[in-house]
Amino acid sequence: MNAFLRTRLEALLPEAGWLSEETADNIDRLACSKLWVVDPIDGTRDYIRGRSGWAISIALVEHGQPVIGVLDAPARGEVWRAGVGQGATLNGVAIHAGNRTLFSGARVPTDALPKIDSDLVIVEKPNSIALRIAMVAADRADLVATLRWGHEWDIAAAVLIAREAGASVTDALGQSLAFNTPSAQAFGVLATAPGIHEAAVSRLSERAKTISSI
């Protein structure tokens, strides 16, 4: 799959660099104004177990930000798309993040919640972090947060889809995300309905600061 995607995408934009989970990183990408950021299978555990919570994630990053994002989740019959300034769609239908303003009761795709977050509500959790972020974009969830270092290919496409759907998306510390960085990593991701993002940063800030400093 990785080789197939690279052949097709590089034919579309020969000048674009390449960053993929399944390709050895090449520092030459940092000199490219455009970069394909690809995860051929995001949510590998679900894929291996025959579950539906995985997706193919493709983003085109330009000058450090995603401008095209596609998530193809064939086991779910779902294709998510976004273009910068063009909105986001699921199977061709426009999607929008929710309008929740009360943090308590926010829907979170997770397996379990710590006691401190017992006021939140658990919903279905696909293994793919990209699909979990897309859930916020489609108002299937209100909050997705990871408090660990992660790779750009995990989130690039989904970040644009969420942004274009009106969600608020930052790193775990509430800072802006950048792509095509030397490490190709970010400290977590925080995607929320816009009305609760500030409260989410406040709730998670001390935990995020502690973990990021380890």
Image (tube, rainbow, N blue to C red):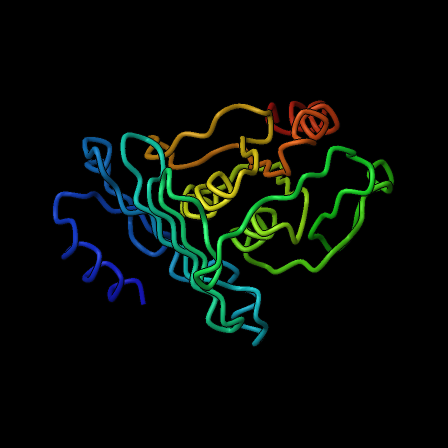
| Outermost residue, front side | 93
116 displayed left or right of 84: right
Q: Is residue 210 above or below residue 99?
A: above
Above or below: residue 46 compared with residue 115:
below
- In the rendered image, the quadrant that contains the C terminus is top right
Residue 8 in percent (x, y) is at: 20, 62
| Residue found at x 59% / y 59% | 127
Which residue is rendered at x = 30% and y = 62% of the image?
2
Q: Report the number of discs.
A: 0
| Residue 168, horizontal then vertical, whole percent | 56, 33
Instruction: Give left or right: position of 161 versus 111.
Output: left
User: Residue 202, position in %: x, y?
Assistant: 72, 23
Question: In which quarter of the view is residue 169 placed?
Answer: top right
Q: Residue at x 63, y 38 (%)?
A: 192
Q: Tell me where residue 85 appears, x and y as whole percent.
A: 37, 38
Q: Is residue 59 left or right of residue 167?
A: left
Please state, as top left, top right, bottom left or bottom right, where the N terminus lies in the image: bottom left
Residue sticking out furthest to the bottom: 50
Residue at image coords 56%, 37%: 189
In the rendered view, tell whether residue 203 sits above or below residue 79.
above
Residue 199 picture quarter: top right
Return the residue nearer the eye: 19 or 136. Answer: 136
